[in-house]
Image (spheres, rainbow, N blue to C red):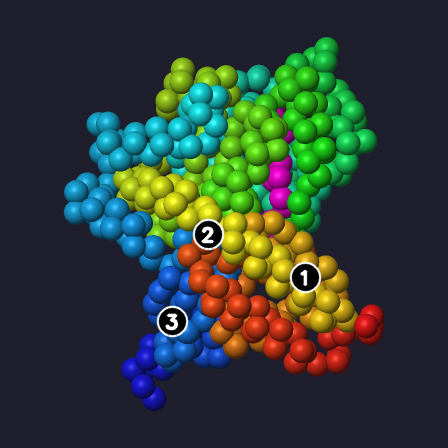
Amino acid sequence: MTAQDESARSALGATRRHLSPQLALVHGMNGSGAIEARGEGARVRLSDGRSALDFGSYAVTLLGQRHPAVVAAVRRELDTLPVSTRVLANRTTAGLAEALTAWADPGRLTKVWLGLNGCDAVEAALKLARLATGRTRVVAVEGAYHGKSLGALATTWNARYRRSLEPLLGGVTHIPAQVSALPGAFAGDGEDADDGVAAVLVEPVQGEGGVRPLEPGFLRALADAAHAHGAFLIADEIQTGLRRCGPRLVSTDLGVRPDAVLLGKALGGGVQPLSAVVATPELYEPLSADPFVHTTTFSGHPLGAAAGLAALTSVEELAPRGAELSELFAAGLTGLAGRHPSLIREVRGQGLLWGVEFATPAAAGEVLTELGRNGLVVSPCLGRPEVLRLLPPLIATDEEAKEALAILDTVCAAVPDEFRPQDRS
Ligand SMILES: Cc1ncc(COP(=O)(O)O)c(C=O)c1O
């Protein structure tokens, strides 16, 4: 056994003993016993020398693995001041806040709170909305995913993650993504401000919920209803923002004018954990009045801020490439669905966020495992196990994109009949 094999066995063993036996089983299956060893652009090298295209990583690696500009920025910060005293101002943290406001919706979203994970941003935004309005209710959308910390979980739709933990944060109403659901969503608002809605929280394209773009008309009506009722509209663009879907932000591109956008995942350039709430002064007012009303030790962490600054610049530089790749993927996936009608129900998405809906969750699971074995990493959808997410990085070459599509085609063609419940060809 080679040293690499031994280190893979040892990592899988420690995963089984100390993290989760189920995780160790899945990781072992996906890597055929090998583990991830090194990131290289659009690829991850495995401990046994094979490499896999990284078109997954739960939407974190929009700039690929170890993007040179991000790595260089983090290295500089590491050699300068990697942690903040938090009692003195920090150049990099303040610089990121300024850059985010200049990038997101200049002149309107002028305030920033920084976190590490997406759910940090969700928690901060919900607290701000409650404090700024003096109200407690939140309207979210069926199928939504906003994270699993206790507050954020109340706004996540999937019962699997909620049921055994209820009661969660009260006052959350989930509505279907239909204009006709809007009048009922705000019922109870009015006479007693305590019954009122503080915030409407929405992903413009539901990611974990199966890559489900919401109708622009619904999003605009939702925003109008929120504002008419004195509630803040919070666009959760943790997955869709930063040009993952094409525009900088899907919400502002649709003319929705959110009171805050939430960013995360790719914001740290695929190198550092980083998230942000970029908000209007009105929503941010509680933090302007008292910066200690919501704090976390690593908020504004300089290493993350350095990564974020480099990521924003790099994402903008690569935007034209994203548009080319998006076209290539749209055409490639449409062709794929046409060639495997008994297996694939639908492909949908935009930009570099694509969902392939399989006939059954078992079929999607089979394809996921086989893709891993054949050198393509994609992400499952936590709320819709029949859907696999393809998240190509902006830095992928045409050859890498075509290679990924070819692997998908080969794997789909080889799926055994028992995973094809009905022949629709
Ligand atoms: C839209 C959206 N919001 C929030 C979250 C939670 O982010 P995190 O897992 O970083 O806490 C996710 C994670 O997948 C997400 O996709």
- Determine crowd level at label 3: few under 14, some 14-19, many 20+ residues with C-alpha closer than 10 A: some
Distance, label 3 to label 2, CA atoms, is 24 Å
> Which residue is label 2 attached to?
321
Q: In which quadrant will I find the C terminus?
A: bottom right
- Outermost residue on the left side: it is 79
The location of residue 3, given as percent across then percent down, is 29, 82
Give coordinates of residue 233: x percent, y percent. 60, 27
Callout 2 secondary element: helix
Q: Secondary structure at mark 3?
A: strand
- Position in image of residue 342 (x %, y %): 77, 71
138 or 418, which lies in front? 418
Residue 415: quarter of image = bottom right
Would you say 167 lies left or right of 115 here?
right
| Left or right of residue 316: residue 234 | right
Q: Tell whether position 204 is magenta.
A: yes
Is residue 112 visible in the rendered image? The answer is no
Q: Magenta span covers which residues?
A: 198-208
Q: Earlier in the sequence, mark 3 or mark 2?
A: 3
> Looking at the picture, does residue 172 appear above or below residue 391?
above
> In this view of the protein, which residue sits in the foreground, 354 or 198?
354
- Residue that mark 3 sits on: 45
Residue 225 or 215: which is nearer the viewer?
Answer: 215
Image point 44% across, 62% down: which residue?
Answer: 397
- Three-letter residue code for mark 3: Arg
Under mark 1, the amino acid is: Thr
Dot in front, 3 or 1: 1
Could you say which disc has been placed on residue 334 in the image? 1
Name the residue at 44% across, 21% down: 107
Magenta segment's dominant SS is strand
